[in-house]
Each structure stands twice: as structure tokens, then as C-alpha cells.
Image (cartoon, rainbow, N blue to C red):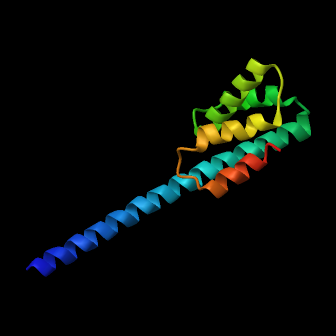
Amino acid sequence: MLKIIGIIGLIISCGMFGISRSTNIKIRIELLEEYYEMVMQLKGQINYFKEPLPELFMKLAQNDSSKVHMFLKALCDEIHEKGFYKRDFWAKKVKCIYQDTVLTNEDIEIMMYLGD
């Protein structure tokens, strides 16, 4: 009887671990897709409209309330506070916004690379 209870407990715990892991992967994919979409929007705006970066960041930051838009809003605030754009602003804000998410360190390093 005790063996059966142990086996059932093991099966339930493995199932719960799998569900938790799959949820984290799903959230990670959503965050990376949002970031990719933002990068494509920035690329299009820069290539076709030749707008300055601070204006682009502010324009794109007003669209939604997701992590990527929080990132752009924080970047805009930093630019307006300092009065200029510096390459390390991007990396600093990526670390600040995405450090407590399910993204891996490798993901965050790749995201920081875009600012260089």
C-alpha cells in the first residue's frame, strides 16, 4: 500500500514539474517573440522613416503594456533624463527589465548585444 502511494506521489510530482517547466518555456518564447517584433519595428522605422532613436523609442513605447514596451519606456526616460543616447543605456535597461524573468543569461546577453 505504501509503495502505491509513493508511486502515485512520484507521478503527480513529475507531472507538476513538467507543467511548470512547459509554462516557463511558453513565457520565455512569448518574451522573445515580443522582443523580436520590437526589433523588426525599429528596423523598419529606421530604414523607411529615418526617425531619430529617442522619438522611435517613445513612439513604440506607447503601444502596449508588455515587458518590451516597459523596456522602451525606461529607455526613453533614461534618454530624456540624461539628454542624450549612450550605447550602454540599452544594456543597462535590458538587465533591469528582463533580469527577473524566465529568460536565460544567454538570451539576455543577445538582447544586450543589439544596443552596441
At x 84%, y 37%, the residue is: 45
**Could you tell me which quadrant the N terminus lies in?**
bottom left
| Along the viewing direction, whichever of 10 and 67 lies nearer the viewer | 10
Is 61 placed left or right of 40 in the picture? left
**Could you tell me which quadrant the C terminus lies in?**
top right
- Against 106, is 46 above or below? above
Image coordinates for residue 44, horizontal then vertical, percent? 84, 42
At x 87%, y 38%, the residue is: 46
Q: Is residue 71 visible?
A: yes
Image coordinates for residue 103, horizontal then vertical, percent? 58, 52
Q: Is residue 61 visible?
A: no
Image coordinates for residue 49, horizontal then vertical, percent? 89, 33
- Against 101, is 20 above or below? below
Is 55 placed left or right of 20 in the picture? right
- Against 98, is 29 above or below? below
Q: How many marks?
A: 0
At x 51%, y 59%, the residue is: 25
Image coordinates for residue 106, horizontal then vertical, percent? 66, 57
Residue at the left extreme of this rendering: 1
At x 10%, y 77%, the residue is: 2
Rendered image quadrant of residue 53? top right
